[in-house]
């Protein structure tokens, strides 16, 4: 037997209440709440209050039949692959602590901006068809990365299309972070 320590990661979480059942339903099922009819909303709320809200997870298999259920007061957390899980309040409080939203979001924004710049550099290098092993500087820590280390970091092949896809995804992520930071600023200003 071996012992393992959980790698510390920051997750997003929402507490399920009677007032946000539809928001939680749309979140975990990845649909817009506007797509749900009033009749469906009533049924979802009624079922959730009695039986709990089904949370589809990675373990559910291809049939997507939920084996996890969130009750009022449970937390719904977003996993590392964008999946969702319900967590009982006592376990959540033992396992997680609140982080400073503003500092965390700004750090995420810095990291994704670095990723974008590094992907731009790699794309430009490939565009010039320079196949030599060249040095890259990690913009986070300043260490030197050769092309193989760089590619391993991003787990991508030397393929311009793949790099462009990743670059596009990072740009979307950056815009989402900027939007979250701006929303957070508005929330702080309203509290003051």
Image (cartoon, grey):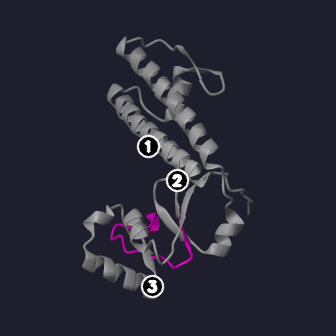
Alpha-carbon span between mark 3 and mark 2: 28 Å
Q: Is residue 59 left or right of residue 3?
A: left
Q: Residues within 10 Å of mark 1 (few under 14, many from 20)?
A: few
Alpha-carbon span between mark 1 and mark 3: 32 Å
Alpha-carbon span between mark 1 and mark 2: 17 Å
Q: Quadrant of the N terminus?
A: bottom right
Q: Which residue is mark 2?
A: 80
Residue visible at 51% across and 72% down? 16
Q: Residues within 10 Å of mark 3 (few under 14, many from 20)?
A: some
Task: Find numbered disc 3 in the image and state the secondary structure of the residue it sits on.
Answer: helix
Residue visible at 35% across and 29% down? 164
Q: Which residue is mark 3?
A: 49
Instruction: Identify the mark nearer the N-term, 3 or 2.
Output: 3
Q: Which residue is mark 1?
A: 176
Task: Give the magenta range.
Answer: 56-76
Q: Nearer the viewer, mark 3 or mark 2?
A: 3
Q: Is residue 92 visible?
A: yes
Residue 175 sits in quarter: top left
Q: Is residue 123 above or below residue 85?
A: above
Tell me where residue 42 appears, x and y as whole percent. 32, 81
């Amino acid at each position: 037997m071996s012992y393992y320590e959980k790698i510390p990661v920051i997750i997003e979480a929402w507490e399920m209440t009677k007032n946000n059942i539809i928001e939680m339903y749309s979140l975990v099922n990845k649909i817009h709440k506007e797509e749900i009819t009033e009749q469906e909303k009533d049924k979802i709320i009624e079922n959730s209050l009695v039986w709990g809200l089904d949370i589809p997870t990675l373990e559910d298999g291809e049939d997507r039949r939920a084996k996890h259920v969130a009750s009022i007061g449970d937390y719904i957390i977003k996993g590392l692959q964008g999946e969702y899980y319900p967590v009982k309040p006592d376990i959540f409080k033992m396992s997680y602590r609140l982080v400073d939203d503003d500092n965390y979001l700004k750090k995420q924004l810095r990291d994704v901006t670095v990723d974008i710049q590094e992907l731009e550099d790699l794309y430009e290098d490939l565009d010039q068809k320079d196949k030599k092993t060249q040095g890259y500087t990690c913009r986070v820590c300043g260490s030197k990365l050769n092309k193989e280390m760089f590619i391993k970091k991003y787990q991508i092949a030397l393929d311009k299309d793949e790099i462009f896809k990743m670059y596009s995804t990072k740009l979307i992520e950056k815009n989402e972070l900027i939007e979250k930071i701006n929303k957070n600023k508005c929330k702080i200003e309203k509290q003051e």
